[in-house]
Amino acid sequence: MSQTTKPTPAGALTGSMRDFRVPGGADLLARVDGFYRWQDQRRQHGLWPFSRATDFGPRTEVTAADDRGIVMQGVNFASQDYLSLSSHPAIRETALEALDRYGVHSAGSPALVGNTTHSVALEKKIAEFLDMPEVVLYPTGWAAGYGVIRGLVRSADHIVMDALSHTCLQEGANAATRNIYQFRHLDLEHCRRWLSTIRAKDTENGIMVVTEGLFSMDSDTPDLAAMQALCHEFKATLMVDVAHDLGALGADGRGHIGVQKMLGKVDVVMGSFSKTFASNGGFVAVRNRAIKEYLRFYSPTTTFSNALSPMQAAVILKAFEIVESAEGAKLRDEMMANVLSLRSQLAAAGLETYGDPSAIVCVKMGSEGLARLVSRRLPEMGLLANLVEFPAVPKGQARFRMQVMAKHSPQNIADAVSIVSRARAEAEVELAELGAPAVAPERVAA
Ligand SMILES: Cc1ncc(COP(=O)(O)O)c(C=O)c1O
């Protein structure tokens, strides 16, 4: 049984963050209290598995404290470091050399003097890697996703986006225009219908179609060639976010754009360095210098934000070198062998996973209540895995997102499967004893 002995109140097993997104009241600061009360009730019962801090970075085995200061030790499937590059000796050495040469700070936007020899070389390297002529760097992947949409789309334009697109893309779209049309996840026919409806009325303004190379909660992928063809047919621009697959998937690490033989053929490619390239940061790759220069001066999250630090630029450049090398191919093979082993061991334990094999292995739980009771037990039993619940995924489809690294050992995988399996069995018993509270959100007064 879980070490938490206090009975679990139903209010800690129901409700969601969505309930507090639009708090009411004239006092902007006081009206956030409701969220804190709900969150803290979860926290007090060990059901708030977020905001953890590790002692030594994203290793396969970690010591991590939760936000009550309670420390766990165990296997780490919660960090994003798919090829285990953040602990690679050459990355560390590169960071130290960059520190010696440039110091710690870029001290300026890329539109001013925030660039360094390494960041300029990095732009060239990514352009060559993706067979796209030009690249713009951003301080984070989030800034790149938000900034590319905000930079190119204006209020009279239209955005047609996969309904499961990442929050940076949704927020960028909301900031750019009110003309947003979501199509059902991966449903090209639905996408086509929106495009044809828009073009029947408006041939004057632009349309951006937004999707991802690998969806981060479902581990699935659109038909990129078909989407680009649709965009040509309706004079729309395709924008693909490759945060999760670039570097980590495909024999040569070009992700689904490479696997689908679409290198150099997608209108706009945007990505993040935070999953595979051992650093914060993001980029946008485009088809000519005019678009690059426009983004540099009209995409607010790069124009008016400080550039990547020199150490980050140097580390990412080195990470691309490794990704492209024979060692990179070996790391991808090791990662994929771990993914396949994890998925098959989970299946053997009766646990279902979402989507196709990738570093993202999401394990189905179902109700938020059950998933939260499992989340309490995982660290107690020695496993870190991220709980994902509504509204990040649909209500009643809570899951644990396990993110695989090349350097996870067979023992790490076996331990993780055994822990998820035992935690789920125990949580089912506790949930039944509690009388299985409703999944429906329960509002806590603000
Ligand atoms: C699909 C997708 N796009 C963009 C981002 C943002 O990237 P970053 O963490 O580098 O800001 C993420 C990461 O959460 C992501 O999953």
Image (cartoon, rainbow, N blue to C red):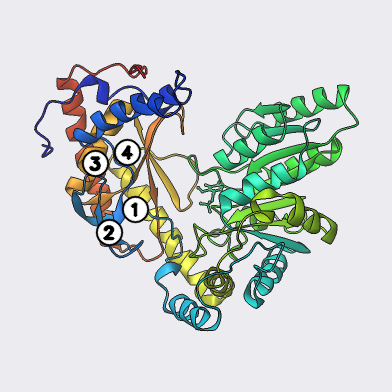
First reached walking from the N terminus: tag 4 or tag 3: 4
Q: Position of residue 246 (x, y in %)?
A: 58, 58
Which of the pair 279/162 is nearer the observer?
279
Residue 117 as seen in the image, left or right of residue 102: right
Disc 4 is placed on an element classified as loop
Q: Residue at x 71, y 30 (%)?
A: 191
Disc 1 is placed on an element classified as loop
Q: How far apart are labels 2 and 4 at the CA level?
A: 17 Å
Tag 3 residue? 421
First reached walking from the N terminus: tag 1 or tag 4: 1
Q: Nearer the viewer, mark 1 or mark 4?
A: 1
The amino acid beneath tag 4 is Leu
Q: Residue at x 80, y 33 (%)?
A: 157
Residue 396 visible in rendering: no
Kindly identify which numbered label has been placed on residue 351. 4
Residue 288 as seen in the image, left or right of residue 48: right
Q: How far apart are labels 2 and 1 at the CA level?
A: 9 Å
Disc 3 is placed on an element classified as helix
Kindly identify which numbered label has been placed on residue 77. 1
